[in-house]
Image: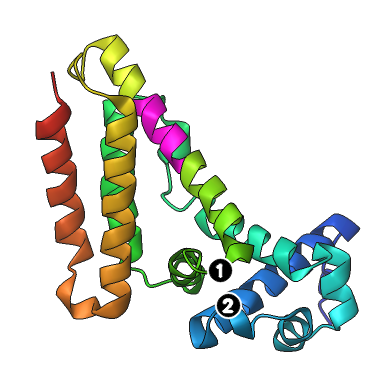
Amino acid sequence: MEAHPTPARRTQEQRRSATRAALLSAAAELVVESGMRAVTLARTGERAGYSRGIVTHHFGSKQALLDALAKASQSGFVPGVGDRPPGLDRLLLLIEGYVGELGRDGVAGRAFLLLWAEAATAPELSGIFRDRDESFRADLRADVAAGIADGTIRADTDPHDVAVAVLGQLRGIGMQRLLDPDAVDTRRLGRAVARQWQRALAA
């Protein structure tokens, strides 16, 4: 008989990462199904097939779990952007790619938008999403500033204003996609929105 190779055992860090990912995925599913109020450490553990103690070990509190979910759901949301240097090209890639990714209807992305909307009236979420939005705006400001410096973006452009406007547009498109998916052709719209910003900003 032919011997089959023994599967390599996962390291402790790999097991920890897999458990953490499963818990975040379970929390995202609960948000999409029933909103932020449905997320508890016990329910998250049950959904993922773990005990509440495991969830507590990884996150410590519901607040920390939601914070981790918000960060994880947007980390690397648009593939390839992190490899580009700041500037107009990266900004346009981000805009088109972000709208395109909304069309995938991923659970984590939908959970992020639902939590973002709830943050306006939920004190336990407001700080988390202010930080996430500011982090996003900082990246957008860096792109605009780099474009001004290298001459691809008009010198009279205000990086702060552009960052606020782009973030608001992307989040707004995402919310429309949640409410009425058939009304938002993300592939076509992503290209159109990127072209609009190119015309508005190009030197």
Can you give x and y, in whole percent of width and height, for residue 125 in the image? Answer: 59, 63
Can you give x and y, in whole percent of width and height, for residue 8 in the image? Answer: 84, 63
Image: 24 above or below 86: below
> Visible in this render: residue 9?
no
Image: 91 above or below 158: below
* Of the pair 156 and 81, the residue shown nearer to us: 156
Please provide the residue range marked out in magenta: 136-143
Magenta stretch encompasses residue 137? yes
Q: Mark 1 or 2 closer to N-term?
A: 2
* Of the pair 126 and 19, the residue shown nearer to us: 126
What is the C-alpha distance between the residues marked 1 and 2? Answer: 9 Å
Residue at horizontal 82 percent and vertical 83 percent from the top? 50
Image: 166 above or below 185: above
Which quadrant does the C terminus fall into?
top left
User: Which quadrant would residue 15 be assigned to in this image?
Assistant: bottom right
Question: Do the residues under discs 1 and 2 have CB atoms within 8 angstroms?
Answer: yes
- On the image, numbered disc 1 is attached to which residue? 122
User: Which quadrant would residue 165 be assigned to in this image?
Assistant: top left
Can you give x and y, in whole percent of width and height, for residue 19 in the image? Answer: 77, 70
Image side of residue 184 versus residue 134, left or right? left
Residue at horizontal 23 percent and vertical 79 percent from the top? 180
Residue at horizontal 64 percent and vertical 76 percent from the top? 27
Say what secondary structure mark 2 lies in.
helix
